[in-house]
Each structure stands twice: as structure tokens, then as C-alpha cells.
Image (tube, rainbow, N blue to C red):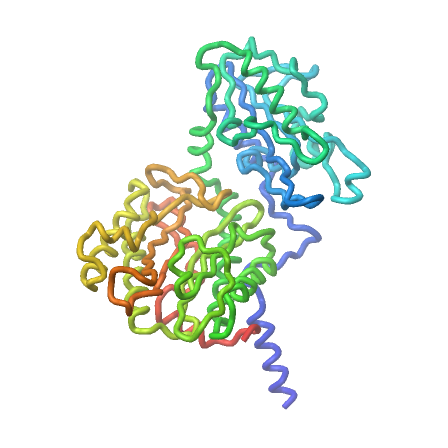
Amino acid sequence: MLRRLCSILLTLFALSQPAAAQQNTEYPNDHLSPAFHAGRRAAVRELMPKNAVAVFFAAQTRNRSNDVDFIYAQNKNFYYLTGLTEPNAMLLLFKEPATINGETGTEFIFVQPRNAAREMWTGKILGVDGVKGKHQLAHVFTHEQFNYNTIDFTKIDSVMTNLYNEKILSKYYSGRGGMDPLSRMAQLVDSAITTYHKPNAVMTLGNILRNLRAIKQPEEITLIEKAVVMSTDGHNGVIRSIKPGMTEYQAQAIMEYYFKKNGSEYPGYPSINGSAENSCVLHYETNQRLMKDGDLLLSDCAAEYHGYSADVTRTIPVNGRFSPEQKIIYELVLEAQDSAFVQCKAGNNSREPHNAALRVITRGLLKLGIIKTEAEARTYFPHGTSHGLGLDVHDPNPGILQAGAVFTVEPGIYIAPGSNCDQKWWNIGVRIEDDILITADGGYKNLSAGSPRTVAEIEKMAKQKSIFK
């Protein structure tokens, strides 16, 4: 009896272990290095025109209610270039060396100063010395040291900024206690730009950043792979645990338990757990319904790790077995995804995976009699098949696929109740989403292959033991 009890406990312990590696240092030590961020800044400068300055702002803090703020999330472009996760900061990149506050260089960053009283409540602020040491930026000042005349715009040919795209300048955001330091710096830059009259002087950084971020560096791919493993572990946990009588939010809780257990700081986006009719709502986030025998559950959930997000979707039967109609629609989506995978190769246009998936779904829906014309296919498959993946869950995607591109392949069919087809198809929403890396050999790697995709594999995993069932 004791031997059997030990065996059961060991089995449960093994099932509860994450697929991702366990942390064995006091704090995680696999963040992007200062050299990575320096390389990204150099890449931006290389693409800037002569005699230009590029201005980047950290994200602002945002108030949620009363004296509680939303959890702070850094502006992704700012993080990409600096690694800094604090607010109230501004980065200046000059094409040619410039002199600011008596120091000469091409990179200058203005950060928030140390504040002992605040740090007692919310944790350490790096300050000037901390930013120099941790992020290895040479020319660091506090934001109070940035004034209207800090930059002589009359000697610069081009000012490059994302300010207007990010709407930072639209209302000079004021948090509790008046204008925050970031908005003050934004106002000063805006005032200088407004009084700066050289033709075509203000330029956007959008294309430069999109082109750079669309192709991932090896260090980025490593972090994306870790986020994907955390995500597939969560999906597998839900497949093993799901049963009639559970709620959508309980499925979400199981999913996000595995994310956090494996070291994810946050979900990559609000978790989507839609069952029955809710599986036909593309971005359903309420997650409140009680799931019943015979329902499908569409789980579009993924982890974020050190700023990089995965994006994985699995559609599973709540009772562990697909009905005949569910299986037909599921396998049609799976065929479409497999067809899209064939087009995931360097040199192809990034629209080719979608075109291939759409052809399969259109042909299948016509054959089943769910649609009468090809144009009707978009009623049941209304979204694209692929988008870039990285710092943002919808990251830039290159026009032409090449090694280092990471993107999703996610065809779907959604037949909502009341659709103009036989009622037996209603309430069947299926999406299968995997994260794909274009490899140096011209092929691709399915980073999320660790979670089952086929009907047989899903039904087999659904029979496995779980600590939650």
C-alpha cells in the first residue's frame, strides 16, 4: 500500500512539473544583454539619415483607479533599444556625435533620479549610476537635466520620432500630482519641433523599427522559444484537466498557473477561453461560462517572458471526445494549417500561408454545403492567418519571409448560432495556432509543436492524469 501511495505521489509530482527549465539562480539571469541593446541602437543609427537625432520615450504610468496604477509595461521600442523597464525616461540617438551637458557622444538617456522614500514602497530605482552599471549606457542624466535648450535643433537636419504615432503629445498626460516628468520632456521636445521650420525635418521612425524588429536576433529567438514552451505546457495542462462542469475562468486559471509556475512574468495578452457559442467570438475575454458536455473550448492563451510573447491556440472537446461534426470542422482547419505550413519558407511572400489556408477552407466549406459561393468563406474565416510575433504579440512581419522571421499560422472556422447553414454546425468555433520560425536552411520550425494538434493526439492527452482532475 505504501509503495503504491508513493508511486501515485511521484506520478502527480511529475505531471505538475513544468516543461521549461527551473530557475537555479537567485534571480533570472537570462535577460537580453547590454550588448544586444547596444547592437540594436547601432542598427537604428546606421539607418538614420545624415545629421539626424532620434527621440524615444519610455511608456507612461497609467492610473487604474484612485491610488492604484495599472501594472507598468515598458514601451516595446524603448525596451528593444535599452532594456530599461522604468518609466520617466527618454533616449536620444544622434547620427553624428553631439555634446549634451558637457558630454560628447551619440547616445544619451535621461532617467528618473533615486528616491529613497519612494523606493521603500515600490522597490529600487536604478538612477544614473544604476543605469550606467546595469545597462552600460555611458551618457546618463536625470530627467531634470533636460531643458528646452538641451538640444540645438537649428543645427540638426532631421528629427526622428514616434511621438505622434504613440499619441504621447496629444494631451501631455498628467497623472496624480500634475504633469509627470515624461510628459514634461515630451512637451519640451514638441515645443522645439513646433518652432523648428526646416522643410521635411520631422520624420517617423516607424519603418526603421518595423524592419529591424521583423527579423529576430538569436537572443530574441531564445526568449520566444522559452515563452512558447511555457505556453504549450499551459495548453497541455488544460487538455489534461478539462471536463464538463468546469468554468471558462477555471480553464484560464489552470493555463495561467503553468505560465507563472514556469517563470512567465505576465500573460502575453488577455487570455481567450471561449466555449460553445463563445468559441465563435474571435477575441472573447469574459471567460465566465459554465462548460457543458459536448462543448468545444477554444483557448487562445500564451505567456510573456522577459518582454517576448508567444501566441498559441488549441481547440479541444470539454468531454475529451470530438463529436462527428466537430471533428469534421477541426480536421478541415488542421488541413488548412498544414497547407499554410508548406508556404512557410524563405523567399515567399508573407501572405502565402494565408492564401493557402483560405483555399483549403473555401473548398472544404463548399463541399460541406455550409457555403454556396467562394466569397462566403470569409463569413466563417474572417481574419488573416499570420502575423509577426516577438516583443508584441502582433509584431512586425516582413513582406518577404527570411531566416529569423517569427510569426503565427492560425486558420480558423467560426460557425455562430443562427448562421445560414444546417444547425448541426452551430456553436463550432475552431482555431489552431502555432508559432513558426523561418530557419537558416530555408525551412521552418514549429516552436509550439510540444502541444498536440491532431484529433487523435488531443483525445489521447485528454485521458491522461492531471493534478486538477
Report whether 15 appears left or right of 435.
Answer: right
169 lies above or below 17: above
- Residue at (51%, 28%) from the top-left corner? 162
Q: x%, y% of residue 106?
A: 59, 20
Q: x%, y% of residue 8?
A: 59, 81
318 lies above or below 335: below
The C terminus is located in which quarter?
Answer: bottom right
Q: Quadrant of residue 145?
A: top right
207 lies above or below 236: above
Report whether 159 appears left or right of 276.
Answer: right
Total labels: the figure holds 0
Name the foreground residue: 468 vs 276.
276
Report whether 337 appears left or right of 25.
Answer: left
Residue pushed farthest bottom?
A: 1
- Residue at (19%, 52%) from the top-left corner? 374
Residue pushed farthest front?
A: 418
164 lies above or below 36: above
Q: x%, y% of residue 462?
A: 44, 73
Q: Quadrant of residue 366?
A: bottom left
- Residue at (65%, 88%) from the top-left corner? 2
Q: x%, y% of residue 329?
A: 29, 64
The N terminus is located in which quarter?
Answer: bottom right
- Residue at (53%, 34%) from the top-left corner? 77
